[in-house]
Image: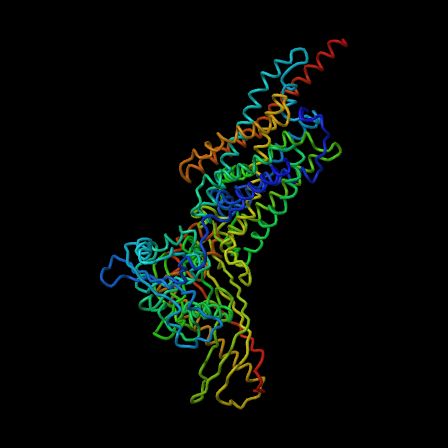
Amino acid sequence: MGKYLRCFTLFFICMCLLTGCWDRRELEERASVLAIAIDQAEEDENLFKMTVQIPIPIKIAGSSGQGGGSNADAVKIMSATGRTVTDATNNLQMRLNQRLFLGHTRVLALSEEIAKEGIHDIMDSFRREPQIRRLLWPIVVKGKASTLLEIKPGLEQIPVVFLMGLIENGMKLGRIPDQTLGDYFNQTSNVTMEPFLNYVEATKKEVSWKGVAVFRGNKMVGILNRVQSWALIQLRNEKPGGDIVIPLPNTKKGYVSFRPHFVKKKLMIQEQGDTKSKGSESFSATYHCELQGDIVELTEDLKIPPEQFIVQMQALIKKEMEERAKKLLLQLQKQYNSDILKLGLTLRAKHYHEYWKKHNWKEDFRDFPVRVKYTIKLRRLGMEMQ
Amino acid sequence: MSRNEGHSWHQNLSMWQQICLMTSTLIGVGVLTLPRTTSSKLFEAGWIAPLIGSAGAFVSLWLIVKLSKRYPGETFIEYSHKVWGSASRPWVGKVFSLPWISIYLVYLYFSTAIVSRVFGEVVVTSVLWQTPLEAMLLTMFLLIFFLCMHEVEVVARVNELLFPFIILPLLFIALASFQKAEFGNLLPINHVSIRSMAEGVYEGIYSYSGFEIMFVFFAYAQKNTNKELAGFYSLLIAALLYMLIVVAGISVFGYEELQRVTWPTLELVKTTQVPGFILERLESAFLAVWVSAVFTTVANAFYVVVYSLRQLFRKGIWFQRIMAAVLLVPLFYFSLIPQNIPEVFQVASLLGLSSLFINLLIPVVYWVVILIRDMMSKREEKDVDG
């Protein structure tokens, strides 16, 4: 009798405790948003238009030979307007049969127009929402942000997966900076630096990385093109950036292409001699940047011995890179006045009492003397002897 | 067996068990907010706070060890009336020790309530949005009740068992997040004033509340173990872990951003990228393991409350079980008193302040009383001799 009672009690307790997740939702019971795009509504300036991309699980066929062309159906693209992001989300929810789930969002596309007006109000809901991952990629899109979600790349069934691949691959190659939402939040909060985001352009069929969008506070102030962005990520992230193609001097159509593999950066901050008489105006910064890489292309034979060729090319690339860096700094300082180089961080860390306390970096970055010195180490010439 | 009075059974907590008991009680919900609270006053140098705080905590712990060494095998409840009373009139000791014992127990009781509340808040805001807070509290209290059914030895073993589940995830998170660290955020360390230094250290000290449970548990330590050393090791483990977490938090987010996030350590988990994306959403896994850290904190404190009551009334294990069940009911309502998150934090910091007060005051007052008594008894001896 006692044994039966014990068995029964055990059974009863198990029934109570092993009920599982009472509020579980199966994967197909939720509308997982993969990407969000935010635009200004066409009809009303005060409204946001939010576009989401939701994959349709049944249509995503990994094995069944659906072939190309059907990828248009693999995702559902919907948009809704609202006064705020949450308002727009609610309006969208009213048109869906499943609950919206933002936990899988990987891309947040912002239109250039909205970014230029400032995205402080948009970002607030993304900061608060616990579902949102700090590792997602916010991207500024030229023109309308929704075009980024509507691309039909053909190579992938889901456009966002294609876009993610593009960014991830670029990151691995060191050509596209890894700028996540968390980084953006940190950089806006941090008083020593300004944020930036990746900038892309989307057409009907494809998407291409155009450079970075420079922010000042929460407002986009301009863009850096590809070449300058690569100079930026060399100086900021120690990533190599893309190939450098330079016209050969004294030739008609000769070009040389240099592929950097390794970057080493050293930021030196100098205090020039008479600190006392001139106050703290005598600080200056020098970036020493070392690039190691190969020649990958040379379209015209220069007919000089390899030893001399290396020396000549190193000088040529050095000159080109320093010019690019100079242009970058000119644009960042004079035009945008935005320290996305994180120069202020080093200044605050190392020269807090002498410099940082006496200056307002947000304004003084403009006139801070910065120099960039490149050292090019040309290692190999590819499979060719010269 | 059921009517024994506590210290009559053998003293068998090994040194390792003492360390586990202390460390796992120290590390609780505080870890989730620690980077924010310490850097709110100390800015970049927030990691100093847990280090200095541990020194303050050690002084208090050392006094507790000395008390328990003077009255070997007796808990705070048992030796209190010996400290306050005299041999001829035992009721004096009982009356005078009662306020101290009740302060101690009331403090532990309410700390149980608020820690479980903070735990519930974290889970409800970050992973289980649909689950009512009450359900979280109830399950936690059921677990606590289950632990309170048993003797001290079981508590020690449970702590020993859960110890790795508390230490390892935190260590992993702290170390893994360094891949995103920006070490410039940790400098300069010398720009805080003495005043804010003091305030910051105060924040640090109260992250160490929890070792006061050793007022009771030291009585059951094995006779030949070095209790000072056990206390030193457990504070050292906690201090290093705290420091790592704070350094990780500041270097990843920067102190400005830290002030804006509610649960910095949880955000740290969210930004940590596990190579290969084996676990996409690490925070759920982290919270699941972290339940054990909270459980040991809450359950140990509550166990001390009911165990002390059992000793106070000189009753057996059944009294303890009934007391646990009875006391958990009002605890549930107490933990629901704070109406919103800012109120929860307010109460939590108030509790931290009182822990600082209690942990330092009780041992110091007790030692002063003991020293005065020693002097008086010496004088009496002298009188007798002379």
> Residue A208 is drawn in which quadrant?
bottom left
In the image, residue B14 above or below residue A123: above
Q: Position of residue B349 (x, y in %)?
A: 48, 36
Q: From the viewer's perspective, is B74 left or right of B176?
A: right
Which is nearer the eye, A376 or B229?
B229
Q: How many marks?
A: 0
Which is nearer the eye, B382 or B268?
B268
In the image, residue B235 above or below residue A372: above
Q: Residue at x 44, y 50 (%)?
A: B257
Q: Residue at x 76, y 33 (%)?
A: B224
Q: Position of residue B90 (x, y in %)?
A: 64, 13
In the rendered view of the protein, which quadrant contains the N terminus of chain A? top right
In the image, residue A200 above or below residue B340: below
Asked whether residue A237 appears in the rendered view, the answer is: yes
Q: Position of residue A29 (x, y in %)?
A: 42, 57
Asked whether residue B363 appears in the rendered view, the answer is: no
In the image, residue A39 above or below residue B78: below
